[in-house]
Amino acid sequence: MSWLIALLGLSVVATIGAGVWLELKPRRLPSPPWLKGGLLANILLFGAGLAGALLMGVGEVMAAEPVAGAVVEISLGKGLALIGIGLPTALAAIGAGIALGPVGSAALAVIAEKPEMFGRTLIYMGLAEGVAIYGLVMSILMLGKI
């Protein structure tokens, strides 16, 4: 297993090295011929190593003896309650994202024309972001009821 982890680490280091090479030599338009093949080989090796680590890890878990101890079980009702508690935060975050898109683009357009309007546009963006905070507060309040 340790050789597999070493292979994964070597692949990551080689990919980082290729990224540093590309960062240091940005003006050289045609890439070296070894770079494309090397990156592809690194990605394939990393995928194979990850799959091997996963399979070896599953084998070790299946071979392990069950640990005696108190297991906390979550009932169906409690699981559904936890999902219901997470929904306000999720839906509020989605709604805030939908609101921030047009408000942010309009704010940038206004600031480009009139830089003195920065404060007002910041307030509008804060109002749109407040929707997500309200959803988070509701989830925290409901979590306290369980």
Image (cartoon, rainbow, N blue to C red):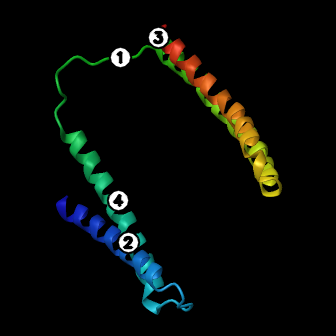
Q: What amino acid type is highlighted by mark number 2? A: Ile
Sooner in the amino-acid sequence: mark 3 or mark 4: 4
Sooner in the amino-acid sequence: mark 3 or mark 2: 2
Disc nearest the viewer among 2 and 4: 2
For disc 4, the neighbor class at 10 Å (few under 14, some 14 to 19, many from 20) is: some
Residue identifier under label 3: 144
Closer to the camera in the image, 4 or 135 = 135
For disc 3, the neighbor class at 10 Å (few under 14, some 14 to 19, many from 20) is: few
Kind of element beneath mark 4: helix
Kind of element beneath mark 1: loop
Give the Cα distance between marks 3 and 4: 40 Å
Q: What amino acid type is highlighted by mark number 1? A: Glu
Disc nearest the viewer among 1 and 3: 3
Examine the image and state in which quarter residue 53 appears: bottom left
For disc 1, the neighbor class at 10 Å (few under 14, some 14 to 19, many from 20) is: few
Residue identifier under label 4: 50
Q: Residue at x 48, y 83 (%)?
A: 36
Give the Cα distance between marks 1 and 2: 43 Å
Q: Residue at x 51, y 18 (%)?
A: 140
Residue 87: in sight, yes or no? no
Which label is found at residue 73?
1
Residue lying furthest front: 116
Which quadrant holds the N terminus? bottom left
Tag 3–tag 4 contact (CB < 8 Å): no
Sooner in the amino-acid sequence: mark 1 or mark 4: 4
Give the Cα distance between marks 2 and 4: 17 Å
Give the Cα distance between marks 3 and 2: 45 Å
Give the Cα distance between marks 1 and 4: 31 Å
Residue 109: where, in percent of width, then height? 81, 54
Residue 43: where, in percent of width, then height? 42, 70
Sooner in the amino-acid sequence: mark 1 or mark 2: 2
Kind of element beneath mark 2: helix
